Image: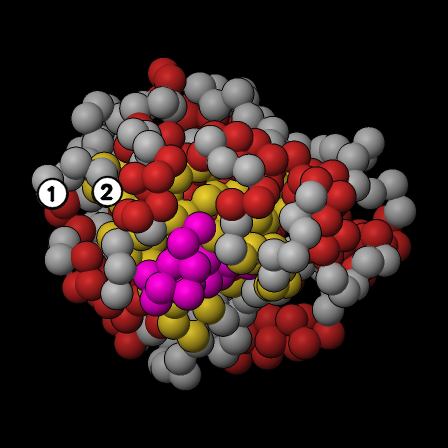
C-alpha cells in the first residue's frame, strides 16, 4: 500500500446557517480545501461526499454530492455519496485514503456537509426521529436501565423534562454505569465539558466560544442526569473537507505543509456484553490503527475524540487506550487533557462546543489535527506535536456505536 498524505483541509464556521443550503456549505468547504492544497478541480481523480439528513431537512435525498459540486466544475470526476450518520465524514476520508493507498487514484477529495437547523420544526424533528434508531435506543434503555437504578442524582438536581431526548438518555445510562464502576464523579464529567468550552474560546470557527467553569456546567439545565446542557453537542450546520494524495502527487504540487496519514481504520458494530468494552468495535479499531501505524497510545501528542456528550470523551479515551479505564475523568479534573497538559484532547472545543454537524464532524477532526501538526492552529496549537489521533463513532446498535473509525496522522518529517 502506498503512502498517503493530507495535502489540503478546510472547515466552515460551525453554527446556525439558516441563510445557506447544505450544498452551499459543501461547496464552500470543497473549494477552500482545494485552495489550501494548491490544486484545481481538474486535478481530482475521485470525490467522496458525506451527508446524513439533507433529505429530511431540504428534500434532496439522492446525488447530494453532484448537486453540491458540479456547479464548481467537478466535471467527469466520479462523485460517490456516503451516508454513515456521525461517521459520514470519517468514512468519506477513509474511502479517499483507500483509493490513493491502493493506487486507484493520485488525488482524492473527501467532503462532509450537514445542515440541521431549519425554521420548519417538523422537518428537523423528522431528522432525529428515524424509527430504526429510536427502536434501538428504546430497547437499550429498556434492557439496561435497571443496572443504574441505584445511581441517583443529588437532591439539588432539577431535571428539565422538556429537554429530554432518548439519545441523551442512552448516553446518561452509560455515564451512570461508568460512575458506578469506577467512581467517576459528576464534577469530573463537568470538568471535561469546562475544558472543551475553554478550548473553544481559541477556535474562531467554533459554534460556541464562551468559557465555562465546572460549577457553571453543573449549574446548567439538566437534560438527562448526569448530563447538563453544556455537556451535550448542539444542533449545528457546517462542512469540512480534506484533499489526500500520493507521494508522487505531493512532489508534483510541492506539498511542504502536507501531513502523513499513518492509519485510517473502520470496524463495524459487535454484539457484546455491555460491560465488555474491550470486546467492542472501538477498542478493536484503535488497536488495529496503532498496529498499522507502528505506534502506541503513549506516542500521541494531541487527540480529537467523539464527544457528543462530555461522557463520550471519557469513554473514547479509555476504550481506545489513550488512558487507563476509570482515569479520563480524573485526568480532565487535573488538567492532563487540557492544552498544555500531558495529552491535550479536543483542543478544537470538541463536539460539545465546536459543534456537531453530523456528517462533517469526522472531517472537522482531520482539519483540526492537520492544523495542529502544521503548527497553524494559532493560540490553541499544542507544543511541537508529532502524532495525532482521531476517533469517531456513528449510530447505535445493541450496546455500542454502529461504526467506529480511528485515524492516526503524523508530521511529514516525523519518521524522516
Q: Earlier in the sequence, mark 2 or mark 1?
A: 2
Which of 171 and 402 lies nearest the eye of the viewer?
402
Which numbered disc covers residue 410? Answer: 2
- Give the answer, above or below, for where 234 lies relative to 89: above
Bin the neighbour count of mark 2 within 10 Å (Cα to Cα): few under 14, some 14-19, many 20 and up: many
Q: Position of residue 304 (x, y in %)?
A: 37, 43
The residue lying at 72 percent from left, 33 percent from top is: 16
Q: Which residue is mark 1?
A: 415
Q: On the rendered structure, is 141 left or right of 413? A: right
Q: Position of residue 275 (x, y in %)?
A: 33, 73
| Alpha carbons under labels 2 and 1: distance apart | 9 Å
Q: Position of residue 114 (x, y in %)?
A: 67, 47
Q: Which residues are magenta?
A: 88-107
Question: Which quadrant: the C terminus?
Answer: top left
Most prominent secondary structure in the magenta stretch? helix
The residue lying at 41 percent from left, 43 percent from top is: 366
- Which SS class for mark 1? loop
Bin the neighbour count of mark 1 within 10 Å (Cα to Cα): few under 14, some 14-19, many 20 and up: few
Residue 78 location, quadrant: bottom right
Q: Residue furthest top?
A: 379
* In magenta stretch: residue 93: yes
- Give the answer, above or below, for where 33 lies relative to 322: above
Question: Which quadrant: the N terminus?
Answer: bottom left
Contact flag, marks 2 and 1 (Cβ < 8 Å): yes
One can see residue 386 in this view:
yes
Amino acid at each position: 500500500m502506498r503512502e498517503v498524505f493530507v495535502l489540503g483541509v478546510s472547515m466552515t464556521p460551525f453554527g446556525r446557517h439558516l441563510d445557506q443550503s447544505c450544498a452551499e456549505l459543501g461547496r464552500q468547504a470543497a473549494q477552500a480545501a482545494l485552495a489550501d492544497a494548491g490544486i484545481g478541480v481538474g486535478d481530482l481523480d475521485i470525490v467522496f461526499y458525506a451527508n446524513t439528513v439533507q433529505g429530511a431537512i431540504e428534500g434532496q435525498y439522492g446525488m447530494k454530492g453532484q448537486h453540491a459540486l458540479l456547479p464548481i466544475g467537478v466535471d467527469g470526476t466520479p462523485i460517490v455519496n456516503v451516508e454513515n450518520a456521525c461517521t459520514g465524514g470519517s468514512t468519506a476520508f477513509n474511502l479517499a485514503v483507500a483509493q490513493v493507498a491502493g493506487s486507484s487514484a493520485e488525488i482524492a477529495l473527501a467532503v462532509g456537509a450537514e445542515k440541521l437547523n431549519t425554521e420548519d420544526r417538523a422537518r428537523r424533528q423528522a431528522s432525529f426521529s428515524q424509527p430504526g434508531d429510536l427502536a434501538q435506543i428504546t430497547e437499550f434503555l429498556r434492557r439496561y436501565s435497571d443496572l443504574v437504578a441505584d445511581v441517583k442524582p443529588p437532591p439539588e438536581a432539577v431535571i428539565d423534562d422538556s429537554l429530554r431526548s432518548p439519545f441523551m438518555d442512552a448516553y446518561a445510562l452509560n455515564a451512570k454505569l461508568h460512575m458506578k464502576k469506577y467512581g467517576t464523579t459528576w464534577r469530573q464529567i463537568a470538568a471535561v465539558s469546562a475544558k472543551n468550552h475553554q478550548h473553544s474560546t481559541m477556535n474562531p470557527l467554533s459554534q460556541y466560544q464562551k468559557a465555562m467553569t465546572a460549577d457553571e456546567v453543573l449549574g446548567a439545565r439538566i437534560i438527562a442526569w448526569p448530563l447538563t446542557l453544556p455537556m451535550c453537542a448542539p444542533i449545528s450546520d457546517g462542512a469540512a473537507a480534506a484533499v489526500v494524495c500520493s507521494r508522487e502527487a505531493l512532489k508534483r504540487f510541492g506539498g511542504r505543509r502536507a501531513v502523513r496519514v499513518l492509519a485510517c481504520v473502520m470496524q463495524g458494530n459487535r454484539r457484546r456484553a455491555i460491560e465488555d468494552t474491550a470486546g467492542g468495535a472501538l477498542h478493536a479499531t484503535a488497536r488495529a490503527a496503532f498496529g498499522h501505524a507502528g505506534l502506541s497510545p503513549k506516542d500521541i501528542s494531541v487527540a480529537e475524540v467523539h464527544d457528543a456528550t462530555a461522557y463520550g470523551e471519557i469513554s473514547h479515551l479509555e476504550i481506545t487506550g489513550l488512558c487507563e479505564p476509570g482515569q479520563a475523568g480524573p485526568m480532565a479534573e487535573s488538567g492532563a487533557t487540557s492544552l498544555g497538559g500531558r495529552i491535550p484532547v479536543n483542543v478544537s472545543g470538541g463536539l460539545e462546543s465546536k459543534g456537531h454537524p453530523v456528517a462533517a464532524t469526522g472531517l472537522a477532526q482531520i482539519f483540526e489535527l492537520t492544523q495542529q501538526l502544521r503548527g497553524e492552529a494559532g493560540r490553541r496549537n499544542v507544543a511541537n506535536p508529532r502524532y495525532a489521533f482521531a476517533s469517531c463513532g456513528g449510530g447505535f446498535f445493541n450496546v455500542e456505536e454502529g461504526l467506529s473509525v480511528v485515524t492516526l496522522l503524523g508530521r511529514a518529517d516525523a519518521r524522516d
